[in-house]
Image (cartoon, coloured by chain):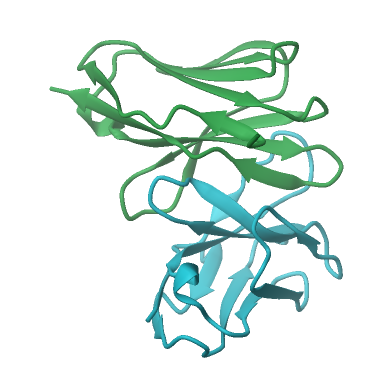
Chain colours: A green, B cyan
Amino acid sequence: QKEVEQNSGPLSVPEGAIASLNCTYSDRVSQSFFWYRQYSGKSPELIMSIYSNGDKEDGRFTAQLNKASQYVSLLIRDSQPSDSATYLCAVLMDSSYKLIFGSGTRLLVRP
Amino acid sequence: NAGVTQTPKFQVLKTGQSMTLQCAQDMNHNSMYWYRQDPGMGLRLIYYSASEGTTDKGEVPNGYNVSRLNKREFSLRLESAAPSQTSVYFCASSENGLNTEAFFGQGTRLTVV
């Protein structure tokens, strides 16, 4: 079992819709969780980080964390074609600082 | 603002050749990472270093060695390159602690023929 799992997609949504991206992780002691966006041929860049149970909102993005279910998600409201990219979930293993990524979900926003 | 700098950006090797990928960061970060990215595979951790003088294996360490030369520099060495090591390699660094962002270099595209 991979330590961080994501659906590879592609997830296709129309412009203006809500895109929902999901991630599960296996290590119960993980403390910090991240969503990175990666455009084709580019380096990953951070969108959101979260380490407390519940929701964290930043503009059109909301990260949700449920540690009991070992589940983290990213909601993108009012999706734009420029949001089309691969979204990578990452988990920081506490104390070791080992940072593990999922395989990424490709998002396509249709104009 | 250099951030994380990787060299080279592109490299073609013949099977069996060796090479070292260089990474340097100027943000005084404690942790540094080496990842490889293959199509549809996300980022897979090769090795990481949580502080100067320490290195640890990640998910796919076989065929690689690393050196944390000092706090700024973290190099990745392929002793005998194989076609299976054809990939894009990313170096990243971060401060240690909760909610700390990892910053990435621009990547090295390596082809082994």
Using residue B73 as the reference point, say whether residue B55 is left or right of it: right
- Placement of B71 over or under A78, stated as above or below: below
Is residue B69 among what the camera can see? yes
Residue B11 picture quarter: bottom left
The percent coordinates of residue B83 (x first, y second) are 44, 74
> In the image shown, does A102 or A48 lie closer to the viewer?
A102
Q: Position of residue B85 (x, y in %)?
A: 50, 70
Instruction: Kindly give the residue lying farthest to the left in the view shown.
Output: A111
Q: How many marks?
A: 0
Residue at position x 42%, y 88% from top? B14
Position of A28 with respect to A79 (left or right) is: right
Question: As displayed, is residue B96 above or below residue B54?
Answer: above
Q: Nearer the viewer, residue B56 or B85?
A: B85
Q: Is residue A73 left or right of residue A81?
A: right
In x, y percent, where is residue A51?
A: 71, 24
Residue, x 67% and y 36% (percent of image)?
A3
Relative horizontal placement of residue B63, taking residue A109 as reference (left or right): right
Q: Position of residue A25 (x, y in %)?
A: 66, 27
